[in-house]
Image (spheres, grey):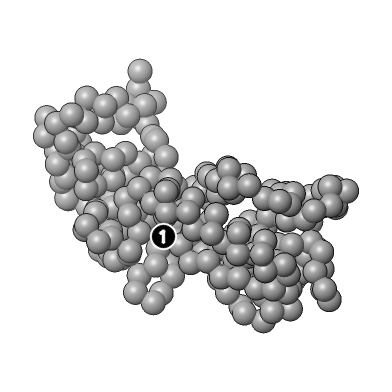
């Protein structure tokens, strides 16, 4: 997850950064967190982001003005406004705030916000895969399965795959039942591409088969029936 923090008080900026890093580490989510002390500095960066923590009261261009410019470039970004002034809440939601946090921000509030963001991003039907130096947006329907490689994962599509440093736990935050199911310690499979199940394997429409862990076989069958709408 790519996160930026734009906050003109360095103490708060550093605290939010540390909270985000701790929470995302606990979630098994690989992240890049950048910090900026003004809206002008942030807008000049041209970063590709999933989420922005944005202070409302900043010198020069305030948070609302900055948000409007950000949305013009990245309409899907999730903006979390941060302020010490409760009366700014209504105005924050007029500019499509994802969340509003009041200073001083607590780690548990950051955790709830990041979990909500992960869930919201999953409903968009796509995940961001970082392959080498490139960032690739993959639609859920284009993912066949995800394979753990120990030091990262391979995300497999039709006739292609991407190597990423993200963990299986990271993808499980974004890919929810019944569309995807973790069939073993090392594999998550898209139910959309399953054509057959037997006592040991799950078969995909790519002519590949993947072993289902013995302890998960019964649950796998149940999840697949739920996905197909079979009682």
* Residue occupying the point 53% across, 66% down: 33
* Residue occupying the point 26% across, 27% down: 219
Furthest-bottom residue in this view:
44
Residue 231, x across and y down, in percent = 35, 18
Please indicate whether residue 111 sits to the left or right of residue 99 in the image: left
Q: Depth check: 42 or 21 in front? A: 21
Residue 203, x across and y down, in percent = 18, 42
Can you identify the residue that label 1 sits on?
30
Circle 1 packing at 10 Å, graded few (<14), some (14-19), many (20+), is some
Q: In the displayed structure, would residue 9 be above or below residue 43? A: above
Choose top left, top right, bottom left or bottom right for residue 138: bottom left
Element marked by disc 1? loop
Q: Depth check: 10 or 197 in front? A: 10
Furthest-left residue in this view:
200
Mark yes or no: residue 5 visible. Answer: yes
Furthest-front residue in this view:
11
* Residue occupying the point 38% across, 45% down: 172
Residue 125, x across and y down, in percent = 49, 50
Please indicate whether residue 48 sits to the left or right of residue 157 in the image: right
């Amino acid at each position: 997850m790519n996160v930026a923090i734009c906050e003109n008080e360095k103490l708060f900026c550093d605290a939010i950064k540390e909270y985000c890093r701790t929470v995302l580490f606990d979630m098994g989510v690989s992240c890049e967190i950048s910090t900026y002390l003004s809206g002008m500095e942030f807008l000049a960066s041209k970063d590709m982001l999933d989420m922005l923590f944005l202070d409302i009261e900043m010198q020069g261009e305030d948070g609302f003005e900055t948000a409007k410019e950000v949305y013009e470039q990245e309409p899907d970004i999730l903006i979390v406004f941060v302020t010490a002034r409760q009366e700014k809440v209504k105005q924050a939601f007029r500019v499509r705030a994802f969340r509003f946090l009041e200073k001083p921000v607590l780690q548990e509030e950051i955790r709830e916000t990041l979990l909500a963001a992960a869930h919201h991003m999953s409903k968009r039907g796509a995940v961001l895969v970082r392959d080498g130096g490139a960032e690739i947006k993959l639609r859920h329907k284009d993912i066949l399965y995800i394979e753990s490689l120990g030091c990262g994962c391979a995300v497999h599509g039709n006739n292609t795959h991407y190597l990423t440093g993200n963990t299986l736990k990271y993808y499980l935050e974004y890919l929810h039942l019944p569309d995807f199911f973790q069939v073993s310690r090392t594999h998550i499979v898209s139910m959309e591409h399953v054509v057959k199940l037997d006592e040991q394997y799950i078969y995909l429409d790519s002519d590949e088969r993947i072993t289902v862990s013995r302890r998960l076989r019964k649950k796998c069958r149940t999840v697949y029936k739920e996905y197909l709408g079979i009682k």
